[in-house]
Every structure is written in structure tokens, then in C-alpha cells.
Amino acid sequence: MQVVREVQERWGPFTVYVHPAWRVDFPFAVHGITGRPRTPQGERLVLGDRDAFVWELGRLARLDRMVRPEQVHGAEVLVVHPDRLGSELDGATADALITGAPRVGLAVLVADCVPVFLVDARRRAAGIVHAGWRGTAAGVLEAAVEAMRADLGVEPSELHVHLGPSICGRCYEVGPEVFEALGLPAPPHRGFLDLADVLAARGEALGVRPDRVSRSAYCTRCDAERFHSYRGEAGTSARMAAFVALR
Ligand SMILES: [Zn+2]
């Protein structure tokens, strides 16, 4: 697994953090995660209506539409088909989205949870996953990778996986029940958990090549000047939008 420091791009009122190699290697796709907004307009979008926030990102990316499901910390995968882009997508419940359709942005909102970006260059497919500990324990990454295979014909060995900015293993202290839920040795009281490491190991166990797995060098809590942190800001309602789309 590589550790990658995302590069910053200025997108209107937003700062968007982008994987430096993906930006070059996957010109057929667009992806990123917003940080703290740059302007008062961005601030209003980040703290206001979440659909408006995500749609503004889609507009700036020149996409036809954005899909943002209701996140429930589960393992449900929403497969976004090119011929089913209507109102059935509104209000959908999922923590993972995948598509082979161009110009449709897939978005999840995070603030400490791990945004997982999935791209396959050969079949031109993309996906995004919202992975907190509950979703990880429920198998959301496994479900997304399996759906990529079953619905889009993408083998895990073809996938590129990036674990975006999230709370790091020195900041994320959890109880023994979290370790148990993840199938990890549990400390007697509380312990520090590196959820991105857990997800990387799970991805590799699914057949994703280790040299195609990367994680962000940023921590949403340590790098507080760049990102919002639910834990670092005492339950803030501000979120970052992580998104991926095929052009
Ligand atoms: Zn940290």
C-alpha cells in the first residue's frame, strides 16, 4: 500500500483534494474530496442543504447529475445504471455506489469515516464507499467489490482502491466492542484503531493488488486546518463530499 498526499485543486468556493497519480493515470474519471470551504459561499453550501452542496460540485465537474444516498452505516450497494437515472435514485439508502455510466457523479459525505474510491481503467467503472467502523464490520467494502464484479464485470485484481482522508490510528480511540465487531483482537478497555489499515487489509484479502491500494497521508482530525472532523469538532454538522464519476 502506498501513502499518498492528495494535491489541492481550487473548484469555485471549494478546495478539492485529488490523488496525484489518479489525476494523470485515469483521464476518463474525475474524483476528489472537498476540504474546508474557501469562501463564505462555500461555507454556506457545506453547512446548508446537502443536496445543493453536492450538486454544486457536480456542476463544477461538468457532470449531468449527482447521486447522494442516505447513509446508514450498512453494506447496501447502489448500482447506478445508465438507463435508470430517474427519481428512483432520490432518497435511496446505501453506503456504497458503483457505476459504469458516464457523467453521473457518485457522492458520499464524510467527516472522519473513510471515503473509499474505486476505479477500474479497463472496463471504465467507478465506485465510492462510505466506511465507518459499523459499515466496515457489516462488510460494505466486500459488498461494493463484489457488486463491481457481478454487475460491471470488474475483477478485484483490476481495481484501484484509494482510502481518502479520514481519522488516523493515533486519533481514533474506540471501545473493545468495535475491535470485536471488526474481528480484531480487542483491548481490555479502549484502544486506538486505524480503520484505513483495516480496510486496506480487507481489500487485499478480496484480491485487490497491494500496489493498487493507497491511503491518504492526511488525517481529518490532525489536519484540522484542511478538513472537518466529527470527533475533533465535537459533533460538527459540516461534512466533506467525496465523489467519483466517469467523464
Ligand atoms: Zn490523526
Image (cartoon, rainbow, N blue to C red):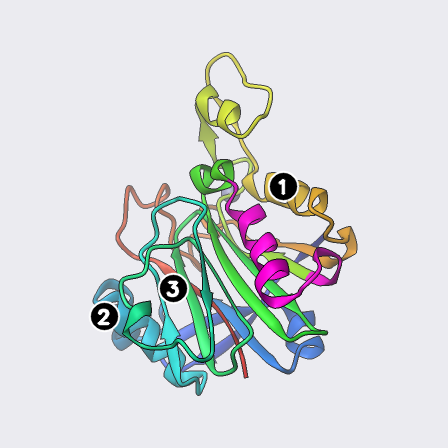
The magenta stretch is 139-159
Q: Is residue 157 magenta?
A: yes
Q: Which residue is mark 3?
A: 36
Q: Is residue 32 magenta?
A: no
> What quarter of the picture does the C terminus occupy?
bottom right
Q: Is residue 9 left or right of residue 90?
A: right
Tag 2 and tag 3, C-beta contact below 8 Å: no
Residue 235: percent from the left, percent from the top?
28, 44
Q: Badge 1, how many Cα within 10 Å: few under 14, some, many 20+?
A: some
Badge 2 element: helix
Question: Which label number is shown at residue 44?
Answer: 2
Q: Please name the amino acid that badge 3 sits on.
A: Arg
Looking at the image, is mark 2 or mark 1 nearer the viewer? 1
Question: Of marks 2 and 1, which one's residue comes earlier in the chain?
Answer: 2
Q: Is residue 188 above or below residue 184?
A: above
Secondary structure predominantly adopted by residues drawn in magenta: helix
Q: Please name the amino acid that badge 1 sits on.
A: Asp
Q: Which residue is mark 1?
A: 197
